Image (cartoon, rainbow, N blue to C red):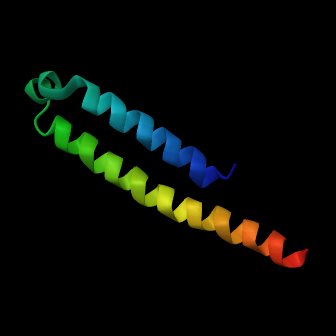
Amino acid sequence: MTQLAKWKTAIQMVAIAFLLLGPAGDKMVPYWTQIGIFLLWVSAIVTLYSGYDYFRAGAKHIMEE
């Protein structure tokens, strides 16, 4: 597993924690839910990039055989 994949997982966990608080979090900190949604989108983008990286590495091994 790459370091990027570990970062992606960490961002996802933080985003889920933000989103679980929902409206209660918005009462404590303004834009709490929006921060969670933003972090979820960041993790989705990182997921696409790391998935492409894994695919490229796998394709290289397939082509060698």
Q: In this view, does 38 lie above or below 25?
A: below
Task: State the residue at coordinates (47%, 58%).
Answer: 46
Task: State the residue at coordinates (41%, 60%).
Answer: 45
Q: Is residue 23 above or below residue 3?
A: above
Q: Which residue lies furthest to the right in this view?
A: 65
Q: Residue furthest bottom?
A: 63
Query: Residue 49 at what x, y percent from top left?
Result: 52, 64
Residue 25 found in image quarter: top left
Task: State the residue at coordinates (27%, 40%).
Answer: 36
What is the count of numbered marks?
Answer: 0
Q: Which of 58 and 14 is in front in this view?
A: 58
Query: Residue 8 at what x, y percent from top left?
Result: 50, 48
Q: Is residue 8 left or right of residue 16?
A: right
Task: State the residue at coordinates (78%, 74%).
Answer: 60
Q: In this view, does 51 lie above or below 13?
A: below
Residue 12 found in image quarter: top left
Query: Residue 41 at what x, y percent from top left?
Result: 33, 53
- Quarter the C terminus occupies: bottom right
Query: Residue 26 at what x, y percent from top left?
Result: 12, 30
